[in-house]
Image: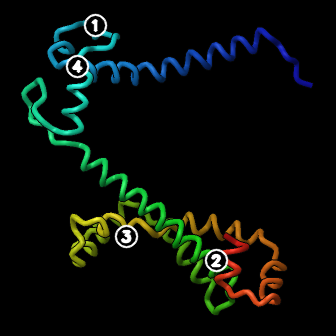
Amino acid sequence: MVDNNKFLDFISHFLLILGALVVMFPLYVTWVASTHSTAEISQNYPMPLSWGGHAWKNYSVALLGGVADSGANISPTYPMLLTSFISALAIAFGKITISVLSAFAIVFFRFPGRNIAFFLIFVTLMLPVEVRISPTYEVVANLGMINTYPGLIIPLIASATATLLYRQFFLTLPKELSEAAKVDGASALRFFKDIVL
């Protein structure tokens, strides 16, 4: 039986809140520092912990580019943010699509070597990213996809982890669903779309 001790609850919550504040403090200092000019930050000691008056100028220079108050020429970051957004959406959509289709084929289709195919997909998890960087770059360069969205997206679409997770889920589905769909005349794609997906 667990005792409900108010004092221990108070102490544990106090420690959790204190830990959260300790973790969030550097983030707060960074955020406040972004609203001050370079001169204010370098001349004031200790650094001010209140909101500064240069937030709009600093953020507009960071996003749109321009000359910072330190005299440095800043490149705009919005094209980089847009590239990251488009790449992330396309990679996520591509990973889900390819992984769910390959797992569906491995689980529901009977073909020779399907376990070997899954093993070959699964074995790629043992290759760290560092091993794949050079060959991936060489392939992308040879295909002329440097500085293009396909060059960023296509090498990152395949995912053995997602295929494994979908496969494990599909194995929990009763085989009777597949048999009932075949008896009712549903094609494999209809079964995939209406029941599995």
The quarter of the picture where the N terminus appears is top right
For residue 54, the mark is 4
**Callout 2: 10 Å neighbours few (<14), some, many (20+)?**
many
Secondary structure beneath label 1: loop
Q: Tell me the kind of residue under disc 3.
A: Ile
Secondary structure beneath label 3: helix
Residue picked out by circle 3: 154
Q: CA distance from mark 2 to mark 4?
A: 55 Å
Secondary structure beneath label 4: loop
145 left or right, relative to 23: left
Residue at image location 29% in from the left, 65% down from the top: 149
**Callout 3: 10 Å neighbours few (<14), some, many (20+)?**
some
90 left or right, relative to 48: right
Residue picked out by circle 1: 46
Q: Tell me the kind of residue under disc 2.
A: Phe
The outermost residue toward the right is 1
Query: Is the residue 12 above or below the residue 65 in the image?
Result: above
Q: How many marks?
A: 4
Q: Tell me the kind of residue under disc 1.
A: Pro
61 left or right, relative to 179: left
Examine the image and state in which quarter residue 168 appears: bottom right
Q: Which label's residue is closer to the chain start, 1 or 3?
A: 1
Q: Nearer the viewer, mark 3 or mark 4?
A: 4
Q: Which label's residue is closer to the chain start, 1 or 4?
A: 1
Q: CA distance from mark 1 to mark 4?
A: 18 Å
